[in-house]
Image (spheres, rainbow, N blue to C red):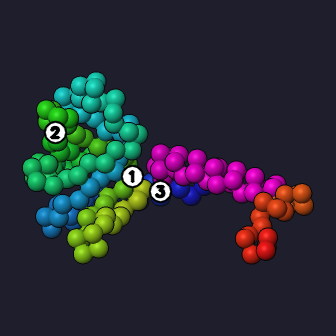
Amino acid sequence: MICQNIKLKALLTKHAKEILHLLIEQNISFSILCDISQTTFDPPLPPDIDKNLDTLTLFVLAGYTFESIEIGTHSISFEAGFGAHNFGSLVTIQYDGIVQILLQDSTLAQEISLFINVSNPNLYSGLEIATQDSEGLEHSFFALSSNPKNAYLFETKDDKS
């Protein structure tokens, strides 16, 4: 599958880094959806906060967090506060752990995806479950509708009159 191709992964990683450079250079706040397995925290987050982080976690980089951004060779780092007590930690995300880069569009009042890392397997885990559920419903509907004894299930009010 092309999405797992090493050359494509390298290209996507380079593309993510270039987009981040541009946004920082232009002083534009943004959000990053990242693969938490490719993210580190220094100091480590307290267990009660850490356990609540999803496999894909969104970070909004604005204000002080934006100002603290450091672009490295293989990762981006920034300071962020977590939980009710604003526990401070340096967040480091490997570039290939960036799943999406999002920009808030005030005109459209929604987020726009500037980048999607199609090579990250966590991007598809939710989609596969939704597709399987959808296919299961289609098979069930087909099974019901193909049996003539179930025709009454598909009658409309107009058909009954």
Q: How far apart are marks 2 and 1 (CA)?
A: 21 Å
**Secondary structure beneath disc 2?**
strand
Q: Is residue 108 magenta?
A: no
> Residue drawn at (15%, 68%), measured in percent from left and top?
26
Amino acid at circle 2: Gly
**Left or right: where 66 falls relative to 155:** left
Camera-nearest residue between 142 and 60: 142
> Residue drawn at (17%, 42%), measured in percent from left and top?
80
- Residue 138 position within the rendered picture, expressed as x and y whole percent measured from the top left: 72, 57
Q: In which image quadrant can residue 161 be found?
A: bottom right
> Residue drawn at (82%, 62%), measured in percent from left and top?
152
Amino acid at circle 3: Val
**Left or right: where 20 falls relative to 37:** left
Amino acid at circle 1: Val
Q: Residues within 10 Å of mark 1 (few under 14, many from 20)?
A: many
Q: Mark 3 points at which residue?
A: 118
User: Looking at the figure, which quarter contains the N terminus?
Assistant: bottom right
- Res 25 seen here: no
Camera-nearest residue between 105 and 97: 105
**Left or right: where 20 falls relative to 52:** left
Depth check, mark 2 against mark 1: the one in front is: 2
For marks 1 and 3, the one nearer the N-term is 1
- Residue 79 position within the rendered picture, expressed as x and y whole percent measured from the top left: 15, 42
**Secondary structure beneath disc 3?**
loop
Q: Residues within 10 Å of mark 2 (few under 14, many from 20)?
A: some
* Extent of the magenta region: 119-144
> Residue drawn at (53%, 56%), measured in percent from left and top?
3
Q: Mark 2 points at which residue?
A: 81
Depth check, mark 3 against mark 2: the one in front is: 2
- Residue 105 position within the rendered picture, expressed as x and y whole percent measured from the top left: 26, 69
For marks 2 and 1, the one nearer the N-term is 2
